[in-house]
Image (cartoon, helix red, strand yellow):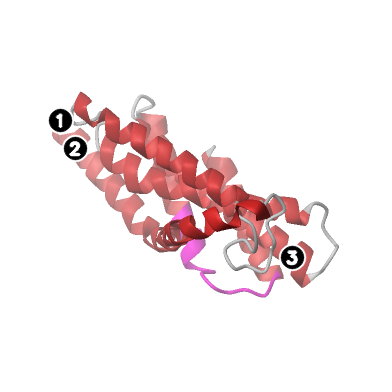
Amino acid sequence: MCGLTLALIACAVALALLNGSNTGAVSFPLAMTASAVAGGFVASRRPTNPVGCFFLGSAACFTLAEVANGYATYGLLTASATLPAAQAVGWLQSWLFVPGVLLLLSFVPLYFPDGRLVSPRWRWVVRFALFFSVTVAVFSALSPGEIQNQGILNPLGIEALRPVFDLLDTLAFALYLLSCSLRQRAWWCATGALGAWSASRSSG
């Protein structure tokens, strides 16, 4: 999965260049590469520790969302009607950022560094995080209008539910902004976590 994520990172960078976008051209591949490599390293060395899978899964979600954004932008805006299913692929970016955020924001802190919860009483937090992630992801996937103000319409948006979505839109947009911030910080988070994990294994 680490190799696939790295290949997708290369695709995301290539699509960004084709679209003439240099925003995050350096920070995005560095951050996602750090997260994927750190996650792959921990997962291969300690397969029973889910922290590695959390880092790897988060990098995969963010990278897939970036590839979907680049693909849809090129197929619908940069070179219109040149790529098949561009709008359908663009739909992926409407919700993939949600699990990417929650994996880093909730699950990594809960299970770091040894892959176990502090106590069984924290299981309710895990259940709530899962429920929250699924709920916000479904909401984002079905929200009508533009996808994250990218100029791409959500093909599965339900217009009749717009009043409900408008009430929840602030929460989803805040989570999206948080995902952007987390992508910028993933390099430090991944490398710091890997160093702390290695130190804890050495002292143990």
Disc ID at residue 74? 3
Q: Viewer-proximal residue, 154 or 100?
A: 154
Taking the spot 42% from the left edge, 36% from the top edge, the residue there is 131
SS state under label 2? helix
Label 2, on which residue? 200
What is the crowding at mark 3: few (fewer than 14 residues within 10 Å), some, or many (at least 20)?
many
- Cα gap from disc 3 to disc 1, whole angstroms: 50 Å
Residue 16 is inside the magenta segment: no
Image coordinates of residue 55 in percent, x first then y, are 41, 43
| Residue lying furthest right | 81
> What is the magenta range?
19-32
The answer, for residue 163, to whether it is visible in the render is yes
Label 2 close to label 1 by CB (< 8 Å): yes
Taking the spot 24% from the left edge, 37% from the top edge, the residue there is 113
Taking the spot 64% from the left edge, 60% from the top edge, the residue there is 69
Q: Amino acid at mark 3?
A: Tyr
SS state under label 1? loop
Disc ID at residue 204? 1
Taking the spot 51% from the left edge, 69% from the top edge, the residue there is 24
The answer, for residue 10, to whether it is visible in the render is no
* Badge nearest the viewer, 3 or 1: 3
Image coordinates of residue 169 in percent, x first then y, are 49, 59
